[in-house]
Amino acid sequence: MSKQNDDVEPYTTFNPGRNIWRKMSKFLFLTGERLGVLGVFGLLVLITAQKIFPYNLGWQGVVYIICGFLLTIFLVLPAPSHPNQLMWREVTMRNLNDYSRSIKVDPLDWEE
């Protein structure tokens, strides 16, 4: 009996749109990048809170920490323009790339 095209081996077929090497984590979608952003910005908020309010945290310090952690949570949300990208890249890196592309110096045209 001859082998038909429908009977290909399962490991040789590929479904478009599924990248098995880049699977999302199942627990709260916590990838390495998101954990890194949470860790860096969380530490940044805590360190700056200790420097700004060294002796008495008070209600202003608590408000500062809550706002900092809300900002940190916002930065790990998916970006609206690119769902596989995080908001911190949308806010920082995309604007820096646009800014660096806009800085161009054209040579002067010398008139004789």
Image (cartoon, grey):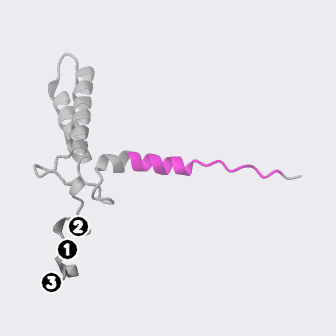
Residue depicted at 15% across the width and 29% down the height: 59
Residue 98, position as x, y percentages in the image: 48, 51
Residue 67 visible in image: no
Is disc 3 placed on a helix, strand or loop?
loop
Residue receiving disc 1: 8
Q: In the figure, 111 relative to 44: above or below?
A: below
* Disc 3/disc 1 C-alpha distance (Å): 14 Å
Residue receiving disc 3: 1
- Amino acid type, label 1: Val
To which quarter of the image does residue 17 belong? bottom left
Residue depicted at 11% across the width and 52% down the height: 26
Q: In the figure, 4 relative to 81: above or below?
A: below
Magenta stretch holds residue 76:
no
| Bounds of the magenta segment | 93-110
Count neighbours of disc 3 (C-alpha within 10 A) and say few if under 14, some if 14 to 19, many if 20 or more: few
* Disc 2/disc 1 C-alpha distance (Å): 7 Å
- Amino acid type, label 3: Met
- Amino acid type, label 2: Thr
Mark drawn on residue 12: 2
Residue 58, position as x, y percentages in the image: 15, 25
